[in-house]
Image (cartoon, rainbow, N blue to C red):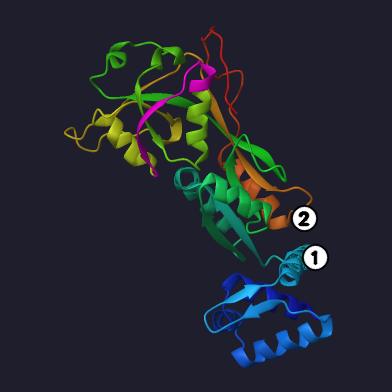
Amino acid sequence: MELRQLAYVVQIAEERSFSRAAEKLHITQPSLSQQLSKLEKELGVLLFKRNTSSVELTHAGAVFVEKATRILDQVEQLRREMEDIAELRRGRLVIGSLPITGAHLLPRVIPAFRAAYPEIELVLVEETTRQLEKLTAEGGTDVSLLTLPLTEPTLVGEPVYEEDILLAVPAGHPLAAAGKPVPLAALKGEPFVTLKKGQGFRAMVHELCQSAGFSPNVVFESANIETVQSLIAAGMGIGFVPRMVIRQAPDPAEPVPVYLPLAERPTRTLVIAYRKGRYLSKAAEAFIRTFRSVFPPPDPSREHAGDHGTSSSVR
């Protein structure tokens, strides 16, 4: 059994097609079929059910793919570790990011990283929170920018950024003229505009409302935080937004939400997450250092200066 044969089987399983797998592997389809037949003969089992329209794993094939994926991942980690030990500056770093968060933070971090490590190839993967956690746990990314709490138990996260969560309301809303922090309990019964399920910030909205004793009355959902803000500005409801996304109207005729602090001062914490026990390459460590240099932690002695009220955080 050879490592390349393991890679061939995993690729066929992913593509569910010999022709597509052969194309991805840069070999001919007859060569791929020959290698698979050779492996199946050696193992004494069939790994795939073949017919004219599809390719499906057998039970033995499913077991083989699960183990082979782990072996190939370990081989890749060993290769990267040896490269680092040899102090090779070249390499490849796959970074996962939430689309909203990445759009506001990574344009400042990636140029700084590129300037310091020009020979390291960067690959950016953007997904929803749920998909990104799964991808990171499976080794599909080296590190990922996520928010606490992490729901995938195999992940660990290093905190790198913290920000306030604000209330956004239409300009004509009674709360807009209050001029003071708004208690969460005052929002019970209000129509909410939120992100769609599967995104971490949507879960945080629900958690905030639950902490005040009610479930949000969601009237509109969107996959895009900018659409959420536009709907709020248009009077369709209220919502929560992270401080980093608040916007100013480029045109006086374009409505924008009114942003208000919440009395409980909730925050969200961003982390750079990776799988427990996975070798963290020097490139990944350098990315974390670069992120922290671009966004240093706030000075606790200056934060909320003059505020003697109580505060709470949602992580």
CA separation in Å, label 2 and label 1:
8 Å
Q: Residues within 10 Å of mark 1 (few under 14, many from 20)?
A: few
Query: Magenta residues, as a range?
Result: 209-223
Q: Quadrant of residue 104?
A: top left
Question: Seen in the image, is 279 located left or right of residue 204?
Answer: right
Q: Earlier in the sequence, mark 2 or mark 1?
A: 1
Reading the image, the residue beneath label 2 is 279
Q: Position of residue 95 (x, y in %)?
A: 59, 55
Q: Position of residue 88 (x, y in %)?
A: 73, 67
Report crowding for label 2: few under 14, some 14 to 19, many 20 or more residues within 10 A (C-alpha): some
Q: Position of residue 292 (x, y in %)?
A: 62, 41
Per the image, the residue denoted by label 1 is 78
19 versus 293 height, above or below: below
Q: Kindly check if marks 2 and 1 are in contact, taking CB atoms under 8 A apart as contact.
A: yes
Name the secondary structure under disc 2: loop
* The C terminus lies in quadrant: top right
Q: Amino acid at mark 2?
A: Tyr
**Of residues 238 and 288, the one drawn nearer to the viewer in this rendering:** 238
